[in-house]
Image (cartoon, rainbow, N blue to C red):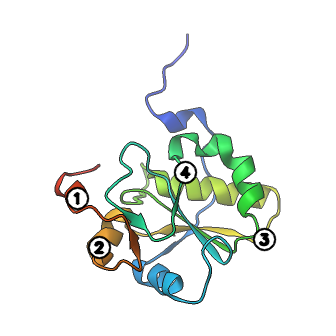
């Protein structure tokens, strides 16, 4: 008898690591500094169908639903970037549920640990894009493509 999975992540291994969460203020300070996106840090927005309304300045978009399949290439490409931040809508995490951003951060850190790569580490942007936009929507140095109308509708 075969069971049917209801969640896209059930097809992949459960993540093991526990990446650190950084506050919006701490990430904003990094972005405003002399640090270079893609070299000194990387911000990864893992939203897919709900990607819109703006994102963290300089973030790349890699869909959570295909991230694990792309993980070897992602590790190869970004293993020398010291700080790799992941986020989704809220970057939520509890005992029973792991959001897309934290899940991808965990998978990235698991892959780094498995390969004994210490030149990069996964981090989670606390409160995700919802918190980021709420705090920085009027700051073009921190938000790309802000669309006020997008945020008038609830996005899970």
Residue 116 lies in what quarter of the image?
bottom right
Placement of 69 over or under 62, stated as above or below: above
**Residue 134: x %, y % from top left:** 27, 71
Mark 2 touches mark 3? (CB < 8 Å): no
Q: Which element is circle 2 on?
A: loop
Q: Mark 1 sits on what residue?
A: 151
Measure the C-alpha gap from mark 4 to mark 1: 21 Å
The percent position of residue 47, horizontal first and vertical second, equals 44, 50
Residue underneath mark 2: 137
Q: Quadrant of the image for the N terminus?
A: top right
The first of marks 4 and 2 along the sequence is 4
Q: Estimate the x, y position of residue 126 in percent, counting from the top left.
A: 42, 70
**On residue 118, which mark appears?**
3
Q: Is disc 3 in contact with disc 1, using a CB cutoff of under 8 Å?
A: no
Indicate the secondary structure of the residue bearing disc 1: helix
Mark 4 in CB contact with mark 2 (< 8 angstroms) = no
């Amino acid at each position: 008898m075969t069971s049917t999975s209801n969640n896209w992540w059930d097809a992949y291994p459960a993540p093991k690591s526990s990446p650190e969460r950084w506050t919006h203020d701490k990430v904003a300070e990094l972005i405003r500094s002399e640090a270079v996106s893609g070299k000194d840090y990387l911000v990864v927005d893992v939203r897919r169908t709900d990607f819109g309304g703006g994102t963290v300045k300089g973030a790349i978009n890699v869909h959570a639903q295909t991230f694990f399949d792309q993980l070897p290439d992602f590790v190869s490409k970004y293993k020398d970037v010291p700080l790799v931040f992941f986020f989704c809508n809220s970057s939520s995490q509890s005992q029973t549920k792991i959001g897309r951003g934290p899940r991808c951060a965990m998978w990235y850190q698991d892959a780094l640990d498995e390969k004994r790569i210490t030149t990069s580490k996964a981090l989670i942007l606390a409160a995700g894009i919802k918190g980021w936009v709420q705090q920085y929507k009027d700051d073009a140095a921190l938000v790309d493509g802000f669309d006020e109308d997008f945020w008038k509708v609830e996005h899970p």
